[in-house]
Image (cartoon, rainbow, N blue to C red):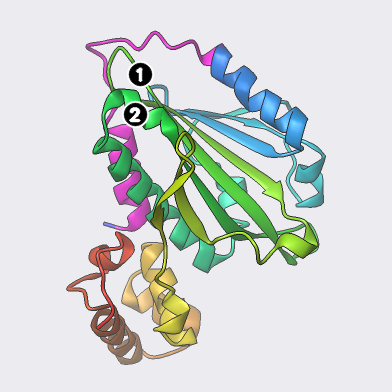
Amino acid sequence: MTIVETLNKTLLKNRTRDKICRMDVEVYKNIAAAYTRTENSIAVLSDMQMNTSYIFSSGAASGLGLSYPENPTVIDSIWEEEILMKIHPDDRMKKYVHELRFFKLLEDNRQEDRSAFCVVSRIRLQDKNGTYQWVRHRMFYFYSPDTHKLRFALCLYDRIADRSQNMLPEFLIINTIKGEVVAEDKFDYRSVLSQRELEVLNCVGEGLTSKEIADILSISFNTVSRHRQNILKKLNVKNSVEAFNGNFTKA
C-alpha cells in the first residue's frame, strides 16, 4: 500500500452513516473564502463525510497556472489533484507523510484540544511557466462534536515573498494557543539518499512497480532492486511503508 492509499484510507475511514455530523458546511466554506479574499491564497476545504472538496481561488492561482471555472469549484474527492500534481515530487511525498503524522498527533489528543494545532510547511509548486515557486502551505483539521471524527480539512496555499523564502521551515506542527512547536521535521532525505535513490523512492511512493520504475528511469530492473535495498538500509527501515510513514532513524 502506498503512502497516498494509506492516507486516503485513514482519512476516509472516519465516514459514518449511523451518526450524522451536524456541522454546517456553509460556515466552513465561508472561512475558506475569507482566507482567500484576505490573503490572496488558494483554499481547499475537504469534507471527509461527503468525500468532496471546495476550491476557492484568487489572483495567485492564475499566476501558478491554476484555473478554476467557479469559485468555489467543487470536486468529488478529498484530494486537490490539479494542485498536488504541480508540487515538486520530493515535497509532495513529504506533504503526504506529514499529513499522516498530523492526523495521528491529533488522534492522540483530546477532542477539545485538537483545534489548537495546525501545520505550516514550505513547498515548491510549479507555475504556469514550468518554474518551481516557493509556496507556504498550512493545514487545519476540524473534528465533529457529534461523531468525534475528522469532518473538514482546510489547506491553504499562498506565495512566499522572495526575501523570506529561507525563513520558513519545511515542516512544523504548531500549537497556536501556546505558541509552541510540537513537531518538527529534522530529517532530510536529501542528506542521506543519492539523487537516483530519491527518484526511485518517489516512484515507489506513487505506487509504481520496480519494472515501471526501471522503464521510466531507463535503468535495469536489477538496478532498481539494488536502489530499493539501499534506501531501506540508509533509512534503517524494514519496508517502504515504514519509510513513507516516517518510522525511520538514521543508521
SS of the residue under disc 2 = helix
SS of the residue under disc 1 = loop
Residue for badge 1? 144
**Residue 9 shows in the view:** no
Above/below status of 207 relative to 112? below
Please tell me which residue is depicted at 29% across the width and 59% down the height of the picture.
245
Q: Amino acid at mark 2?
A: Asp
Q: Position of residue 59 (x, y in %)?
A: 82, 40
Instruction: Indicate the quadrant containing the C terminus: top left, top right, bottom left or bottom right.
Output: bottom left
Q: Amino acid at mark 1?
A: Ser
Residue 165 in which image quadrant: bottom right
188 with respect to 223 (left or right): right
Above/below status of 160 relative to 44? below
Q: In the displayed image of the protein, which residue is found farthest to the front?
A: 178
Residue for badge 2? 113
Q: Residue 144 versus residue 212: which sits nearer the camera?
A: 144
Above/below status of 27 relative to 251? above
Above/below status of 163 relative to 60? below
Q: Position of residue 221 (x, y in %)?
A: 33, 87
Q: Position of residue 227 (x, y in %)?
A: 33, 86
